[in-house]
Amino acid sequence: MSAEEDGGSLFVLTAVLLTPTQFPTAFGDDFPQACGLLGVPPVADGYGLVLGQDAEGARWTVVVDDVSLVATAIASWDCGMEYELSPDESTIVLSLAGWPLDLTVAAPGIPEPHDPEQGADGTGRVPLAPPSAESWGPVQRRLGADQIAREWADWRERVATDGGAAAAAHPGLARALREATGYAVQAPPAGRVRSAFAGEGVRTFRADGPGWSLVARTDDAAFVLLDEEPGEVLTVPRAGDAELPGLTELLAALARAATGPS
């Protein structure tokens, strides 16, 4: 795969979407925060991010506004199909040095991946880099919630076995649930609430707020992670919380509003 980047060849390694309903949560609690990380405005249609190396092996992230092209490429790769992702130069919004995500692949036949010199992209900023995994913070909290959403069955089994973390009187948990419920009164920024298909008639909900992340599933429990509780997962059993069904209905409504009519 190759593309043109600032007049030079870019060997494309992967691509991701940056839209109000789908973006790497490592970037921020919501879509505007994620866009702010890259220095682009949070436009409604979003962007595609193309990650690759130039002929010298330098890491580059190319932001394009042809979202459908990037989405088609990702869908093709997910199905095991080849797809030549070559965005037109006119669709390039910005080229940034570095990668904001950790990649374990490299383009064959060129030098090992490395960051270009600071300022090589004309922004004056240090090259993008993936978040550190050495300390607990908002990024790790969001990534932890993503993991729970992906491995829901394992986490439900763990809760069934050990009962989960004691959460009934936790003030941080109460604050997170209160703020999530408050989204019904004051709509959150785009991307704070997202949903994904999880089986027939079932959806998984992801919600974030200042210092907290929530994962819930239709007709099931919820899990909450907090900045002030490194590595802890607080459980809200559906049977033991009279307000949880209403919260999941609220999240479903917000997610539907974000994606528009189906």
Image (cartoon, rainbow, N blue to C red):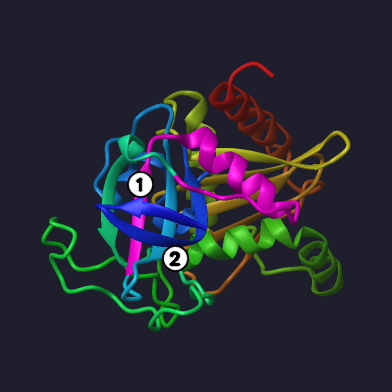
- Which residue is located at x 53 percent, y 37 percent? 69
* Residue at image point 75% right, 50% down: 221
Most extreme residue toward the top is: 261
Residue 39: x and y, percent? 24, 47
Identify which residue, 198 or 169, lies in the foreground: 198
Q: Quadrant of the C terminus?
A: top right
Q: Is label 2 in a helix, a strand or a loop?
A: loop
The reply to whether dot 2 and dot 1 touch (C-beta < 8 Å) is no
* CA distance separating discs 2 and 1: 14 Å
Q: Is residue 194 above or below residue 9?
A: above
Label of residue 101 in the image: 2
At which x and y percent is residue 20? 47, 35
Residue situated in front as seen by the camera: 42 or 180: 42
What are the residue bounds of the magenta stretch?
59-86
Q: Which residue is tagged 1? A: 63
Specify the amino acid type for callout 2: Leu
Can you give x and y, in whole percent of width and height, for residue 142 in the image? 51, 59
Question: Of helix, strand and loop, which one carries label 1?
Answer: strand
The single residue placed furthest to the right in the displayed view is 200
Amino acid, disc 1? Val
Residue toward you, 166 or 25: 25
